Structures are given as C-alpha cells and as structure tokens.
C-alpha cells in the first residue's frame, strides 16, 4: 500500500495541503501518516527554561494532530505522530523510516530575503526528500 506523509503545524497552509490532497484524490486507498514536529528548544547559558514551555508545545502538537485527524475522518488508515527537533530534519527522517511514496505539505510563502536567511521547511523537504513532494501554495 502506498504511503502518504502529511506534515502539519496547525497553520492554514498545512490545512490547505490536506484539503488539496483530499480534493485531488491523492489519499484514496493510501496509508496516511500525519506528522507534527515540536521544535527543539536549545537552552541558553544563564537562562532557565520553564518546563511549562515543553508542556505547552506538546499540548499544541496534540491539538494540531487532532484537527488534522478530524479532516481525515473518512480515511481508515491514518497514523499520527509527534516528533521533537528541527521540523525539516524530522519530516525527512520520518519519511525515510516509513518508506513514504509521497509527501504533501503546505508552503508559507516566505519572501526571497526570508528564504535566504531563514530557510524554508518546504524547500528543505523538497530538495532533500527521497520521494515525491507535492507542495500546496496558499
């Protein structure tokens, strides 16, 4: 069975990517994996990080997955996972782990200046993925 990976972050572009996948029939008869990535927090010397930050991020991740699963309620083969770390890296690792055939994801539309300095998760996944990537612009 083909495997489709849907990275979600709770944003409108990631929701639109799911809806586009449904609309285009890209999810029918597929094993669907939803991933959300909680960004890793790097402690800075001299500052104490509250454990509440981690708890809040985890709660937001769970809400994001719940919302995505609700959109996919008509599909029987849905797996949802949360990872912690760099979003681009974790998406690529998970896609490789499951042997994804297709990644469908949203694009936030960073401007050229922002892309040069900040990078883009969708650009990174597109450029380094071992499988096909369908990027939905919103």
Image (cartoon, helix red, strand yellow):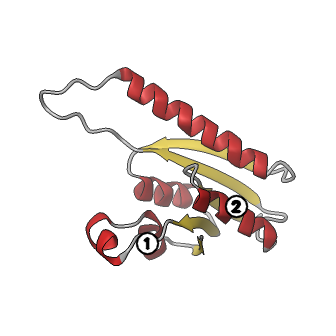
Residue 4 in view in this figure: no
Give the crowd class for mark 1: few <14, some 14-19, many >=20 residues within 10 Å.
some
Q: Label 2 belongs to which residue?
A: 18
Q: Quadrant of the C terminus?
A: bottom right
Q: Quadrant of the N terminus?
A: bottom right
* Residue 123 badge: 1
**Residue 105, image x and y in percent?**
59, 65
Say if 137 sits above or below 8 in the image: below
Residue, x 47% and y 71% (percent of image)? Answer: 109
Circle 1 sits in a helix, a strand or a loop, which is it? helix
Q: Give the alpha-carbon distance from disc 1 to disc 2, as whole Å.
A: 18 Å
Residue, x 34% and y 77% (percent of image)? Answer: 112
- Is 4 or 105 nearer to us in this picture? 105
**Residue 129, image x and y in percent?**
49, 70
Circle 2 sits in a helix, a strand or a loop, which is it? helix
Residue 130 in view in this figure: yes
**Residue 49, image x and y in percent?**
28, 26
Is 43 on the left-hand or right-hand side of 22? left
* Residue 7 badge: none
Say if 136 sits above or below 96 in the image: below
- Is 89 or 67 nearer to us in this picture? 67
In primary-sequence order, the first of circles 1 and 2 is: 2
Is 6 on the left-hand or right-hand side of 77? left
**Residue 137, image x and y in percent?**
58, 73
Residue, x 55% and y 47% (percent of image)? Answer: 36
Which corner quadrant of the image does residue 4 belong to? bottom right
Say if 77 sits above or below 96 in the image: above
Which corner quadrant of the image does residue 39 belong to? top left
Contact between labelled residues 2 and 1, with CB atoms less than 8 Å apart: no
Residue, x 38% and y 74% (percent of image)? Answer: 111
């Amino acid at each position: 069975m083909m495997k489709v990976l849907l990275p979600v972050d709770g944003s409108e572009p990631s929701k639109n990517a799911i809806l586009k996948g449904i609309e285009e029939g890209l999810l029918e008869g597929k094993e669907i994996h939803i991933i959300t990535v909680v960004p890793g927090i790097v402690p800075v010397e001299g500052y104490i990080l509250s454990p509440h930050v981690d708890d809040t991020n985890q709660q937001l991740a769970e809400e994001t997955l719940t919302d995505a699963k609700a959109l996919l309620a008509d599909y029987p083969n849905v797996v949802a996972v949360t990872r912690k770390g760099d979003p681009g890296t974790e998406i690529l690792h998970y896609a490789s782990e499951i042997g994804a055939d297709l990644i469908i994801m949203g694009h936030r539309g960073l401007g050229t200046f922002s892309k040069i300095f900040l990078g883009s998760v969708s650009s990174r996944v597109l450029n380094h993925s071992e499988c096909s990537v369908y990027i939905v612009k919103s």
